[in-house]
Amino acid sequence: MGWITRETETAPCEVEVSHCFDSLHAHVKFLNGATINPGDEVLVHGAPVMAPYGEVVREERTATITRASKLEQFWTRATGDFEFMELCEFSFSEEVSV
């Protein structure tokens, strides 16, 4: 992997979608042991996996992993903490609740 070039690889994966009262999530598990690094992109192929309420659905799919270049990995690590702050909502006001 170069400092500027990106590489792609294909990996088998299992998609798990849960739509339950206790848990609402979607997870992708790579069946070949592939790991994802900062800046990498994952595209899971196929139709969207839909889970009816109260169920957990698991399907095997194929995913394309686009590996970030060394420069992109460095940039993602350096700026990741700042982008996390975009998810936070702050409010500053002079009003005092009594």
Image (cartoon, rainbow, N blue to C red):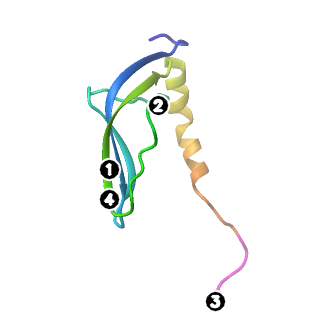
Return the disc, 2 or 4, that comes first in the chain's sequence: 2
- Disc 2: which residue: 43
Q: What's the distance in space between the residues labelled 2 and 4, CA to CA?
A: 24 Å
The three-letter code of the residue at mark 2 reads: Leu
> Residue at horizontal 54%, vertical 19%?
71
Return the disc, 2 or 1, that comes first in the chain's sequence: 2
- Disc 4: which residue: 55
Does residue 24 lie above or below 21 as drawn? above
State left or right for residue 16 relative to residue 74: left
State left or right for residue 73 relative to residue 95: left
The three-letter code of the residue at mark 1 reads: Val
Q: What's the distance in space between the residues labelled 3 and 1, CA to CA?
A: 48 Å
Q: Residue furthest right?
A: 94
The three-letter code of the residue at mark 4 reads: Glu
- Disc 1: which residue: 57
Front residue of 66/44: it is: 44
Return the disc, 3 or 1, that comes first in the chain's sequence: 1
Quarter of the N terminus within the rendering:
top left
Q: Are marks 1 and 4 in contact (CB under 8 Å)?
A: yes
